């Protein structure tokens, strides 16, 4: 079998990466889909349990958990430190939920693991149309990181970001097309306050998720 | 003070990074030099003690130790696993001491730490003229990684690899010009078998180090 026929999904148990997971299952077949989930001092350890439950239910090939506890040693922010309130940093232009270098770290560790499994395709659920403006969610970063990974390990990785140009409404549409709209709505966790499914309803992540859902439902009619 | 007037040195306590450290002290002043050392299951934990001793003796500004114990979870090789004998992999063209993605990981974590200290300049002691042929020691990788880091964190890092085009003999020459030839020869650890200074004399790293030393001494006359 060609290495390109297997994929490693960077999987958090949230709406975006779960939608990517279902798309990967359709495209590669569940036996060729592998997942990797990172523990890095998230406020809600429940997120990992949610990811484990979904991965187990979908009977994918392997699910690797990697503990990045040390990450909090080198940086500080609201997602890692429960004493910091989540807010927008007016100067920086993006919210203080940004964890410097997070997606680069995830891609790098995923790539190291993927190569050890003979996998070239790495799937990540980032989107530059997202509200956040995180620099490491942009296509320019993803493409540059792909090139750097290939040079670093002398290996032909292909970093795939299926949601890059999708709005939240379009990500819900994709889930619907994959036949998993209801599953994603009920079983994923994106809420900053750790409430599964439709969430607390008031944190920035819940507001974004619900607005996208409503938009899609209106379009669908 | 300009952020460019401070530097973070990726520091292992070996010949190369110690030479880089002394060069950084000369160029930035010791109070503007910071170090970062990684623990990642090296065969010789002594390497870290050597690094700590040198950093303390040189009275640099800060010395950060980061434990990357999880690294062994995602990859396997001779430097991380004492059951694997160090040898050259004839197929791959480089020895099995290669740790996939190591320099990219070091640069990424160093960059996260540097940004938190307001530092833009990151110094790494890699060389592409080295015997090893490691893909992540090449200038093409370093330049690509620099660009990716800047995109990932929206920050103007400058990755500096002062030894990139130097042979081992020229690195000894640089130490001599910095007035630390004897210090580097006696106090650094590069030997795979953990013998400080001139080393065990028989591992690939000792052979390389000694050959460079002898070459430089012959040139110097």
Image (spheres, coloured by chain):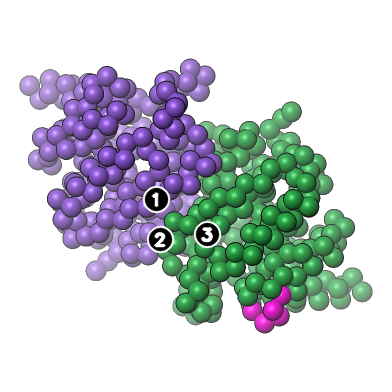
Chain colours: A purple, B green
Whether the residues at callouts 2 and 1 have beta carbons within 8 Å, the answer is yes
Vertical arrangement, residue B93 with respect to residue A147, above or below: below
Q: Which sits earlier in the primary sequence, circle 3 or circle 2? A: 3
Q: Are marks 3 and 2 on the same chain?
A: yes
**Percent x, y of residue A93:** 47, 21
Q: Which mark is residue B73?
A: 2
Q: Is residue B200 magenta?
A: yes
* Residue displayed at 53% across by 69% down: B79
Q: Which mark is residue B40?
A: 3
Label 2 marks which chain's residue? Answer: B
Residue B127 visible in image: no
Q: Residues within 10 Å of mark 2 (few under 14, many from 20)?
A: few
Q: Which mark is residue A67?
A: 1
Outermost residue on the bottom side: it is B202
Judged by its main secondary structure, the magenta piece is: loop
Q: Quadrant of residue B42?
A: bottom right
């Amino acid at each position: 079998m060609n290495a390109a026929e297997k994929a490693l999904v960077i999987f958090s148990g949230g709406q975006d990466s779960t939608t990517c997971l279902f798309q990967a299952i359709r495209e590669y077949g569940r036996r060729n889909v592998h997942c990797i989930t990172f523990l890095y001092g998230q406020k809600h350890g429940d997120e990992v349990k949610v990811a484990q439950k979904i991965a187990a239910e979908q009977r994918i090939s392997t699910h690797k958990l990697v503990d990045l506890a040390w990450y909090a040693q080198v940086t500080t922010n609201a997602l890692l430190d429960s004493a910091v309130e989540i807010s927008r940093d007016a100067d920086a232009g993006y919210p203080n939920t940004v964890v410097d270098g997070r997606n680069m770290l995830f891609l790098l560790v995923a790539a190291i693991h993927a190569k050890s499994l003979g996998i070239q395709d790495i799937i990540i659920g980032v989107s530059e149309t997202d509200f956040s403006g995180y620099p490491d969610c942009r296509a320019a970063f993803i493409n540059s990181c792909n090139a750097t990974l290939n040079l670093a390990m002398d290996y032909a990785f292909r970093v795939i970001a299926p949601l890059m140009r999708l709005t939240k409404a379009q990500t819900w549409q994709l889930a619907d097309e994959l036949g998993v709209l209801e599953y994603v709505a009920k079983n994923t966790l994106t809420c900053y306050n750790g409430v599964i499914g439709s969430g607390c309803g008031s944190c920035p992540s819940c507001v974004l998720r619900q607005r996208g859902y409503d938009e899609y439902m209106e379009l669908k009619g």
